Image (spheres, rainbow, N blue to C red):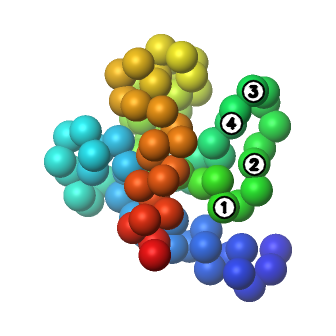
Amino acid sequence: MTKEEKAHKQAVAELCCMVCRTKLGINDSPAELHHLRSGGWGKGDYKTLIPLCYRHHRGEDGIHTLGTKAWEKHYGTQQELLNETLERLA
């Protein structure tokens, strides 16, 4: 892992969950790192990481529980959340 990759992952991890922030107005939920996936199971590079809390990542309302299509109907697209993440890091 390069210094740039490590720094980026750390910065993303320090952001709160993008679903909690953008949809629920909660600005302090601890986040896990989720790789945006489009068109398959492969992980993107480190610049496609989205911070999601346990509930929205792997929990009962999580993308890995509901599936991408159902999850995005509730919370918006992963690309929109990635864009928000990158804007907050800039």
Using the rendered view, name the quadrant where residue 87 is placed. Answer: bottom left
**Which amino acid type corresponds to the residue marked 2 in the rendered image?**
Gly
CB contact under 8 Å: marks 4 and 3: yes
Using the rendered view, name the quadrant where residue 31 is placed. Answer: bottom left
**Which amino acid type corresponds to the residue marked 4 in the rendered image?**
Arg
| Residue 81 in view here | yes
**Residue 76: horizontal and vertical position, in percent?**
40, 31
- Distance, label 4 to label 1, CA atoms, is 12 Å
Circle 3: element type: loop
**Residue 32: horizontal and vertical position, in percent?**
51, 52
Q: Who comes first in sequence, dot 4 or dot 2?
A: 4
Q: Residues within 10 Å of mark 3 (few under 14, many from 20)?
A: few
Q: Who comes first in sequence, dot 2 or dot 3?
A: 3
- Distance, label 4 to label 2, CA atoms, is 7 Å
The residue that disc 3 covers is 39
The residue that disc 1 covers is 47
Q: Residue at x 38, y 50 (%)?
A: 17
